[in-house]
Image (cartoon, grey):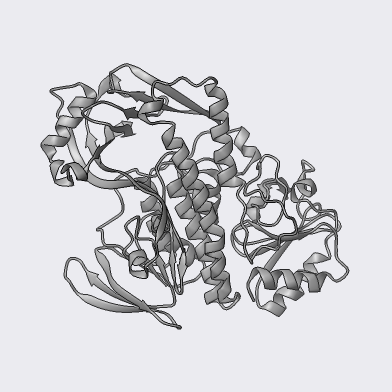
Amino acid sequence: MLVVGAGLAGLASAMFLAQRGVDVLLVERRSGTSLFPRAVGQNQRTMELLGFGGLAGDVPTLTPSLAKFRVRIAASLPGPTFHEEVSETDTTDLSALSPARLGTAGQDKLEPLLRRRAEDLGAELRFDTELVSFSQDDDGVTAMLSGRRDGQMSQVRSDYLVAADGNRSDVREALGVDRHGPGSLGYNVSIIFDADLGDLVDPEPPTLHVLHNEQANGVFITVDHAIDRHLYSVGYDPAAGQSLEDFTTERCTELIRLITELPDLRPEIRAVRPWEMAASVADRFRVGRVLLAGDAAKVTPPSGGFGGNTAIGDAYDLAWKLAAVLGSTAGTALLDTYDAERRPVAERVVAEALRLAGSRGPASATEDSEDPADEQISDQKRAVELTLGFRYRSASVLATDDDPADTEDPYRPTGRPGFRAPHVWLRCNGERLSTVDLFGHGFVLLSGAEGGFWTGVADGVAARLGITVRTHTIGDDLADTEGEFLARYGIGASGVSLVRPDGVVAWRTAEAPSDPAQVLLGALTTALAR
């Protein structure tokens, strides 16, 4: 398996694929992982997926208390505040949604963790290596690679190619895949610098400063208070003759002095990187044996923090499906469900990020909401529904209802096929665990207290298909201490819920059918595109 790009999508793809026993080669033109925080924060769904990958324990998380994050709109750091929003996340309340906590890592911290985990699992990662060209046929992909330091050319052959090479994806362009959406929203340069800014920055609560003035529109955030490291991202206009070359050390210093109002400040410039704010979604996520992931598939404004989280979601979805196809436990048509399931998610998160970005523009900076608390609750509700209440519709999901809703309230889960399998607290041998802790490897069958017979049924069907299906009888080997399992999963005491490796419900039956083995065989055959 060849993965191109070592951002979040690429590194996560390599990690999840290697974990499933797939031989992985990842190539990246850069010399290492990102120095820039970029995508900061991991939602609960992402932390669940990282948990499936054995990595969640290494990611810093919010403590189980009230966490705050401030967005401040002003002309400069010491200047008067035009508008301010403080979001408050009660992490204790979130335990009703998932056993996973919210992650707080920036991309500069998470990428090295993903890299190390992928390598530990056996993935081969080659930095300073560029994809020069590729071609595909009915049996695989042939790629030409070039070492950026020595110019040495090499050819590799792989079954599939995962294109995780960013917003300006060369792979996507070579495939001729168009994109739709607003497109470019502006060009920016991010400056990482070290400086003691004293009282201008306060670690509590963490604050994103959105700065609007005639000379330097941009955003500022402190990356690491312990070492006085900060990030300032400022826009530039190529149409006006501006370019990255304008951002010399002297110019960057001048801009930092401007926003801090400290004319004698001597910041140490650590790195300068251009980036394009854009909003678009690829028209296709799969072209034969090439699959697009992360920013190559969609790019979204940073508002809402959806980009990096969605990239990891892409990676997990790709990995379990590719591993099943390569292991001959699934038909190749299963890969078509990647586009069917992940592209609608991309459409929804891009739309929400655009909405949030519009609420933080210059025009909104001086506008007072009639009820900002209601707006904040509404934003949080949308985010939770997008990340935990999403719905997949594809040939791999055996849906039995005509509900047109794309999301549901995860505080009131239904357990219907296509939705994330609900989190329910259980107890086993005196230990507390979640239903979510049972997922992430293969298919899982969860039954009610009268469904013990499903274990034998599942073993027989799994042997026939050459797969593994793990079964759990809730109320027997696992105690439903809070009495919520049946209601949340929408089944009766003899019913069963079939959960995919990604923790999404593939099929369920409220009560035992007359021929359980035949019905389960049909459900698994459909879910695996056999």
* Residue 51 place in picture, x, y as percent: 54, 52
Spot the residue most to the right: 514
* Residue 462 place in picture, x, y as percent: 71, 74
Spot the residue most to the left: 250
* Residue 338 place in picture, x, y as percent: 53, 64
Rendered residue at 55%/48% (across/down): 45
Rendered residue at 53%/28% (across/down): 376
Spot the residue most to the top: 80
Q: Which corner quadrant holds the N terminus?
A: bottom left
Question: 281 or 373, which is in the foreground?
Answer: 281
Classify 412 as above or below 361.
below
Question: 272 or 274, which is in the foreground?
Answer: 274
Q: How many marks do you count on the picture?
A: 0
Classify 223 as above or below 375.
below
- Picture quadrant where residue 147 is located: bottom left
- Picture quadrant where residue 175 is located: bottom left
Image side of residue 355 versus residue 442, left or right: left
* Residue 484 place in picture, x, y as percent: 77, 44
Residue 266 visible = yes
Image side of residue 45 versus residue 289, left or right: right
Q: Which corner quadrant holds the C terminus?
A: bottom right
Question: 141 or 468, which is in the foreground?
Answer: 141
Residue 304 visible = no
- Picture quadrant where residue 200 is located: top left
Classify 270 as above or below 522.
above
Rendered residue at 59%/58% (across/down): 502
